[in-house]
Protein backbone atom coordinates (compact mmCIF):
# COMPACT_ATOMS: atom_id res chain seq x y z
CA UNK A 1 0.00 0.00 0.00
CA UNK A 2 2.82 2.43 0.88
CA UNK A 3 4.74 1.69 -2.37
CA UNK A 4 1.59 2.48 -4.36
CA UNK A 5 1.31 5.86 -2.61
CA UNK A 6 4.92 6.70 -3.49
CA UNK A 7 4.45 5.62 -7.14
CA UNK A 8 1.30 7.70 -7.63
CA UNK A 9 2.95 10.83 -6.25
CA UNK A 10 6.41 10.27 -7.72
CA UNK A 11 6.69 13.79 -9.21
CA UNK A 12 6.10 15.60 -5.90
CA UNK A 13 8.92 17.16 -3.87
CA UNK A 14 10.58 14.87 -1.37
CA UNK A 15 9.13 16.76 1.61
CA UNK A 16 5.57 16.29 0.33
CA UNK A 17 6.25 12.62 -0.43
CA UNK A 18 7.37 12.18 3.18
CA UNK A 19 4.19 13.79 4.47
CA UNK A 20 2.04 11.55 2.30
CA UNK A 21 3.91 8.43 3.31
CA UNK A 22 3.56 9.45 6.96
CA UNK A 23 -0.15 9.97 6.41
CA UNK A 24 -0.34 6.54 4.80
CA UNK A 25 1.41 4.94 7.75
CA UNK A 26 -0.90 6.79 10.13
CA UNK A 27 -3.93 5.67 8.14
CA UNK A 28 -2.80 2.06 8.18
CA UNK A 29 -2.14 2.31 11.93
CA UNK A 30 -5.56 3.84 12.53
CA UNK A 31 -7.26 1.17 10.46
CA UNK A 32 -5.33 -1.55 12.27
CA UNK A 33 -6.12 -0.05 15.66
CA UNK A 34 -9.74 0.41 14.70
CA UNK A 35 -10.00 -3.18 13.52
CA UNK A 36 -8.39 -4.42 16.72
CA UNK A 37 -10.79 -2.42 18.89
CA UNK A 38 -13.81 -3.61 16.91
CA UNK A 39 -12.65 -7.23 17.17
CA UNK A 40 -11.96 -6.84 20.88
CA UNK A 41 -15.40 -5.35 21.45
CA UNK A 42 -17.05 -8.20 19.54
CA UNK A 43 -14.97 -10.80 21.41
CA UNK A 44 -16.01 -9.27 24.73
CA UNK A 45 -19.72 -8.89 23.94
CA UNK A 46 -21.77 -11.54 25.78
CA UNK A 47 -24.01 -13.73 23.63
CA UNK A 48 -27.78 -13.35 23.53
CA UNK A 49 -28.52 -17.07 23.56
CA UNK A 50 -27.62 -19.22 26.56
CA UNK A 51 -27.99 -22.89 27.46
CA UNK A 52 -28.42 -24.11 31.01
CA UNK A 53 -25.53 -26.29 32.21
CA UNK A 54 -26.49 -26.94 35.83
CA UNK A 55 -26.23 -25.11 39.14
CA UNK A 56 -23.58 -23.65 41.39
CA UNK A 57 -22.99 -26.06 44.29
CA UNK A 58 -19.72 -24.84 45.85
CA UNK A 59 -18.12 -21.40 46.13
CA UNK A 60 -14.59 -20.79 47.43
CA UNK A 61 -12.36 -17.79 48.04
CA UNK A 62 -8.66 -18.24 48.84
CA UNK A 63 -7.55 -15.06 50.63
CA UNK A 64 -3.95 -16.31 51.14
CA UNK A 65 -2.27 -17.79 48.09
CA UNK A 66 -1.66 -21.56 48.54
CA UNK A 67 -3.58 -21.71 51.83
CA UNK A 68 -7.02 -23.18 52.58
CA UNK A 69 -10.20 -21.53 51.25
CA UNK A 70 -13.06 -19.73 52.90
CA UNK A 71 -16.35 -21.42 51.99
CA UNK A 72 -19.06 -18.94 51.02
CA UNK A 73 -22.78 -19.01 50.35
CA UNK A 74 -22.61 -15.95 48.09
CA UNK A 75 -20.00 -13.59 46.70
CA UNK A 76 -19.62 -10.43 44.68
CA UNK A 77 -17.73 -10.92 41.43
CA UNK A 78 -15.23 -8.12 40.76
CA UNK A 79 -12.23 -7.80 38.47
CA UNK A 80 -9.80 -9.27 41.03
CA UNK A 81 -11.99 -12.29 41.75
CA UNK A 82 -14.84 -13.31 44.07
CA UNK A 83 -15.07 -11.26 47.25
CA UNK A 84 -17.08 -10.17 50.28
CA UNK A 85 -15.96 -6.72 51.41
CA UNK A 86 -12.26 -7.18 52.39
CA UNK A 87 -12.32 -10.94 51.90
CA UNK A 88 -10.84 -11.18 48.42
CA UNK A 89 -9.35 -13.97 46.39
CA UNK A 90 -5.56 -14.35 46.66
CA UNK A 91 -4.76 -10.85 47.87
CA UNK A 92 -2.30 -12.19 50.47
CA UNK A 93 0.79 -14.26 49.80
CA UNK A 94 3.80 -15.55 51.66
CA UNK A 95 7.17 -14.37 50.35
CA UNK A 96 10.82 -14.83 51.22
CA UNK A 97 12.84 -11.90 52.54
CA UNK A 98 13.44 -10.68 48.96
CA UNK A 99 9.72 -10.56 48.19
CA UNK A 100 9.59 -13.65 45.96
CA UNK A 101 6.38 -15.61 46.39
CA UNK A 102 6.27 -18.93 48.24
CA UNK A 103 3.67 -21.60 47.45
CA UNK A 104 2.63 -25.04 48.64
CA UNK A 105 4.68 -26.51 45.80
CA UNK A 106 7.66 -25.71 48.05
CA UNK A 107 5.93 -25.93 51.44
CA UNK A 108 2.99 -28.37 51.15
CA UNK A 109 1.68 -27.76 54.67
CA UNK A 110 0.66 -24.26 53.60
CA UNK A 111 -2.65 -25.84 52.57
CA UNK A 112 -3.37 -26.44 56.28
CA UNK A 113 -3.35 -22.72 57.08
CA UNK A 114 -7.06 -22.01 57.56
CA UNK A 115 -8.37 -18.45 57.22
CA UNK A 116 -11.68 -17.14 58.52
CA UNK A 117 -13.21 -13.67 58.59
CA UNK A 118 -15.45 -11.80 60.99
CA UNK A 119 -19.09 -11.05 60.11
CA UNK A 120 -18.18 -7.77 58.42
CA UNK A 121 -15.41 -9.41 56.39
CA UNK A 122 -12.89 -6.90 57.70
CA UNK A 123 -10.69 -8.94 60.05
CA UNK A 124 -8.90 -12.14 59.03
CA UNK A 125 -7.91 -14.88 61.49
CA UNK A 126 -5.42 -17.61 60.57
CA UNK A 127 -4.96 -20.96 62.27
CA UNK A 128 -2.59 -23.86 61.56
CA UNK A 129 -1.61 -27.07 63.37
CA UNK A 130 0.41 -26.28 66.49
CA UNK A 131 0.14 -22.51 65.99
CA UNK A 132 -1.72 -19.81 67.95
CA UNK A 133 -4.38 -17.85 66.10
CA UNK A 134 -3.07 -14.92 64.08
CA UNK A 135 -5.29 -11.84 63.71
CA UNK A 136 -4.92 -9.38 60.83
CA UNK A 137 -6.92 -6.16 60.51
CA UNK A 138 -7.16 -6.07 56.75
CA UNK A 139 -8.54 -2.53 56.55
CA UNK A 140 -5.51 -1.14 58.40
CA UNK A 141 -3.07 -2.52 55.84
CA UNK A 142 -3.75 0.33 53.45
CA UNK A 143 -1.71 2.59 55.73
CA UNK A 144 1.29 0.23 55.81
CA UNK A 145 4.54 0.92 54.00
CA UNK A 146 4.46 0.06 50.33
CA UNK A 147 6.85 -2.55 48.98
CA UNK A 148 7.30 -4.68 45.87
CA UNK A 149 6.91 -8.43 45.53
CA UNK A 150 7.36 -10.94 42.73
CA UNK A 151 4.84 -13.54 41.56
CA UNK A 152 5.62 -15.71 38.52
CA UNK A 153 8.30 -13.28 37.41
CA UNK A 154 6.03 -10.24 37.58
CA UNK A 155 6.61 -7.39 40.01
CA UNK A 156 3.47 -6.39 41.90
CA UNK A 157 2.75 -3.66 44.45
CA UNK A 158 2.26 -5.01 47.98
CA UNK A 159 2.33 -3.91 51.59
CA UNK A 160 3.99 -5.89 54.34
CA UNK A 161 1.73 -7.29 57.06
CA UNK A 162 4.22 -6.75 59.86
CA UNK A 163 6.62 -8.59 62.12
CA UNK A 164 4.01 -10.67 63.98
CA UNK A 165 2.68 -12.21 60.77
CA UNK A 166 6.25 -12.73 59.52
CA UNK A 167 7.21 -14.63 62.69
CA UNK A 168 4.02 -16.69 62.54
CA UNK A 169 4.66 -17.96 59.01
CA UNK A 170 8.41 -18.36 59.58
CA UNK A 171 7.81 -20.48 62.66
CA UNK A 172 5.16 -22.60 60.98
CA UNK A 173 6.88 -23.15 57.64
CA UNK A 174 10.59 -22.81 58.48
CA UNK A 175 10.71 -23.54 62.20
CA UNK A 176 12.66 -20.29 62.50
CA UNK A 177 11.99 -16.80 63.85
CA UNK A 178 12.38 -15.12 60.46
CA UNK A 179 12.83 -15.81 56.76
CA UNK A 180 9.28 -15.40 55.47
CA UNK A 181 6.94 -12.42 55.22
CA UNK A 182 3.21 -12.06 54.60
CA UNK A 183 2.40 -9.51 51.90
CA UNK A 184 -0.92 -7.95 50.86
CA UNK A 185 -2.05 -6.69 47.46
CA UNK A 186 -3.76 -3.32 48.21
CA UNK A 187 -5.21 -2.34 44.82
CA UNK A 188 -8.76 -2.92 43.59
CA UNK A 189 -7.58 -3.50 40.04
CA UNK A 190 -4.91 -5.68 38.47
CA UNK A 191 -1.43 -4.36 37.85
CA UNK A 192 -0.59 -7.39 35.72
CA UNK A 193 -0.95 -7.69 31.96
CA UNK A 194 -1.19 -11.41 31.34
CA UNK A 195 -4.45 -12.62 29.76
CA UNK A 196 -5.54 -9.12 28.80
CA UNK A 197 -5.86 -7.86 32.34
CA UNK A 198 -7.81 -10.88 33.65
CA UNK A 199 -4.90 -12.14 35.77
CA UNK A 200 -6.27 -10.60 38.96
CA UNK A 201 -4.12 -9.78 41.99
CA UNK A 202 -1.78 -12.67 42.89
CA UNK A 203 -3.39 -15.58 41.02
CA UNK A 204 -1.40 -17.96 38.83
CA UNK A 205 -3.44 -17.34 35.69
CA UNK A 206 -6.82 -15.58 35.87
CA UNK A 207 -9.07 -14.27 38.62
CA UNK A 208 -11.68 -17.07 38.31
CA UNK A 209 -11.50 -20.83 37.93
CA UNK A 210 -14.53 -23.03 37.32
CA UNK A 211 -14.72 -26.74 37.93
CA UNK A 212 -17.22 -29.38 36.88
CA UNK A 213 -18.21 -31.85 39.60
CA UNK A 214 -18.71 -34.63 37.06
CA UNK A 215 -15.13 -34.27 35.82
CA UNK A 216 -13.66 -35.18 39.20
CA UNK A 217 -16.16 -38.05 39.48
CA UNK A 218 -14.83 -39.39 36.18
CA UNK A 219 -11.25 -38.96 37.38
CA UNK A 220 -12.01 -40.86 40.59
CA UNK A 221 -13.12 -43.88 38.55
CA UNK A 222 -9.51 -44.09 37.40
CA UNK A 223 -7.89 -43.59 40.84
CA UNK A 224 -7.29 -45.94 43.73
CA UNK A 225 -7.11 -43.04 46.21
CA UNK A 226 -10.07 -40.76 45.54
CA UNK A 227 -9.77 -36.98 45.49
CA UNK A 228 -12.16 -34.10 46.10
CA UNK A 229 -12.67 -30.86 44.19
CA UNK A 230 -10.61 -29.02 46.83
CA UNK A 231 -7.51 -30.77 45.52
CA UNK A 232 -7.92 -28.55 42.43
CA UNK A 233 -8.67 -25.24 44.22
CA UNK A 234 -11.61 -23.93 42.17
CA UNK A 235 -13.68 -20.82 42.85
CA UNK A 236 -16.87 -22.23 41.30
CA UNK A 237 -18.05 -25.83 41.31
CA UNK A 238 -20.91 -26.70 38.96
CA UNK A 239 -23.18 -29.74 39.14
CA UNK A 240 -25.05 -30.87 36.04
CA UNK A 241 -22.80 -30.94 32.96
CA UNK A 242 -21.36 -34.14 31.55
CA UNK A 243 -17.70 -34.79 32.37
CA UNK A 244 -15.42 -32.29 30.62
CA UNK A 245 -18.38 -30.53 29.03
CA UNK A 246 -16.83 -27.29 30.28
CA UNK A 247 -14.03 -27.71 27.73
CA UNK A 248 -16.39 -26.43 25.04
CA UNK A 249 -17.79 -23.42 26.89
CA UNK A 250 -16.77 -20.00 25.66
CA UNK A 251 -19.08 -17.95 27.90
CA UNK A 252 -20.46 -18.58 31.39
CA UNK A 253 -23.25 -16.81 33.27
CA UNK A 254 -23.89 -17.32 37.00
CA UNK A 255 -26.41 -15.12 38.77
CA UNK A 256 -25.80 -11.54 37.63
CA UNK A 257 -22.19 -12.16 36.61
CA UNK A 258 -20.94 -12.98 33.11
CA UNK A 259 -17.55 -14.51 32.34
CA UNK A 260 -15.58 -15.27 29.19
CA UNK A 261 -13.45 -18.38 28.77
CA UNK A 262 -9.75 -17.55 28.77
CA UNK A 263 -7.86 -20.85 28.81
CA UNK A 264 -7.91 -24.37 30.26
CA UNK A 265 -6.56 -24.78 33.78
CA UNK A 266 -3.25 -26.61 33.32
CA UNK A 267 -2.37 -28.80 36.27
CA UNK A 268 0.93 -29.13 38.12
CA UNK A 269 2.49 -30.83 41.14
CA UNK A 270 0.19 -28.82 43.44
CA UNK A 271 -2.62 -31.26 42.65
CA UNK A 272 -0.72 -34.05 44.39
CA UNK A 273 -0.98 -32.32 47.79
CA UNK A 274 -3.81 -33.64 49.97
CA UNK A 275 -5.69 -30.59 51.31
CA UNK A 276 -6.65 -32.52 54.46
CA UNK A 277 -3.15 -33.68 55.43
CA UNK A 278 -0.77 -31.29 53.67
CA UNK A 279 1.19 -34.27 52.34
CA UNK A 280 2.07 -34.85 48.68
CA UNK A 281 1.13 -38.20 47.16
CA UNK A 282 4.24 -40.43 46.81
CA UNK A 283 3.21 -41.54 43.31
CA UNK A 284 2.28 -38.01 42.18
CA UNK A 285 -1.40 -38.79 41.90
CA UNK A 286 -3.77 -37.62 40.56
CA UNK A 287 -1.38 -35.72 38.27
CA UNK A 288 0.10 -38.90 36.82
CA UNK A 289 -3.33 -40.25 35.87
CA UNK A 290 -4.46 -36.92 34.44
CA UNK A 291 -1.44 -36.91 32.14
CA UNK A 292 -2.61 -40.20 30.66
CA UNK A 293 -5.80 -38.74 29.20
CA UNK A 294 -6.11 -34.97 29.72
CA UNK A 295 -3.13 -33.56 27.81
CA UNK A 296 -4.01 -31.12 25.03
CA UNK A 297 -1.68 -30.99 22.00
CA UNK A 298 -1.23 -27.21 22.07
CA UNK A 299 -0.47 -27.02 25.81
CA UNK A 300 2.42 -29.44 26.26
CA UNK A 301 2.62 -32.06 29.01
CA UNK A 302 0.52 -30.30 31.65
CA UNK A 303 -2.98 -31.86 31.73
CA UNK A 304 -6.08 -29.66 31.55
CA UNK A 305 -8.67 -29.88 34.31
CA UNK A 306 -11.13 -27.02 34.78
CA UNK A 307 -11.30 -23.67 32.98
CA UNK A 308 -10.00 -20.18 33.67
CA UNK A 309 -12.46 -17.30 33.26
CA UNK A 310 -12.27 -13.54 32.91
CA UNK A 311 -15.06 -11.32 34.26
CA UNK A 312 -17.04 -9.40 31.67
CA UNK A 313 -20.02 -8.26 33.76
CA UNK A 314 -19.80 -7.83 37.53
CA UNK A 315 -22.53 -9.21 39.73
CA UNK A 316 -23.48 -11.35 42.71
CA UNK A 317 -23.46 -15.14 42.67
CA UNK A 318 -24.85 -17.50 45.29
CA UNK A 319 -25.15 -21.22 45.85
CA UNK A 320 -28.03 -22.74 43.88
CA UNK A 321 -27.80 -20.18 41.08
CA UNK A 322 -28.33 -21.71 37.63
CA UNK A 323 -25.20 -21.83 35.51
CA UNK A 324 -25.54 -21.06 31.81
CA UNK A 325 -23.02 -21.42 28.99
CA UNK A 326 -22.62 -20.43 25.36
Image (cartoon, helix red, strand yellow):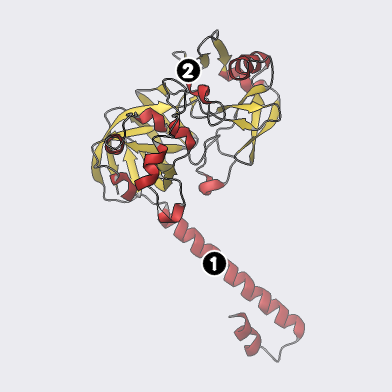
Depth check, front residue: 259 or 112:
112
Which residue appears at 65% of the width and 13% of the height? 164
The reply to whether residue 269 is in sight is yes
Q: Quadrant of residue 175?
A: top right
| Count of numbered tags | 2
Circle 1 or circle 2, nearest the eye:
2
Counting residues from the N terminus, which is met first, the one under dot 1 or under dot 2?
1
What residue would you read off at disc 2?
Answer: 114
What residue would you read off at disc 1?
Answer: 32
Which residue appears at 36% of the width and 28% of the height? 59
Q: Residues within 10 Å of mark 1 (few under 14, many from 20)?
A: few
Q: State the CA–CA distance, disc 1 to disc 2.
A: 50 Å
Which residue appears at 53% of the width and 45% of the height? 197
Q: Is residue 246 above or below residue 31?
A: above
Q: Is residue 246 above or below residue 128?
A: below
Q: Residue 60 at what x, y percent from top left?
A: 40, 27
Q: Secondary structure at mark 1?
A: helix
Looking at the rendered image, the quarter that the N terminus falls into is: bottom right
Q: Residue 120 at what x, y percent from top left?
A: 46, 15
Q: Residue 91 at what x, y percent from top left?
A: 55, 28
Q: Residue furthest front?
A: 283
Image side of residue 247 versus residue 105, left or right: left
Amino acid sequence: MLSKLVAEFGELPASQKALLVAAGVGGVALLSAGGYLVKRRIDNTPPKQWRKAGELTELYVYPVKSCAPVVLQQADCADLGPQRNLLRDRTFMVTNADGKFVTARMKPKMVLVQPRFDERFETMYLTAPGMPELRIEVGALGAADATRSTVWGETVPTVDCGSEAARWFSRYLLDKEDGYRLRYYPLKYTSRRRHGGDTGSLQDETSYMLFNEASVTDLNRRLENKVTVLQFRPNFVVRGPEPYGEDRWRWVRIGDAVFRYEMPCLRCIFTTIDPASGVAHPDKEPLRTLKQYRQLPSYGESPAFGIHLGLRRAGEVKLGDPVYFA
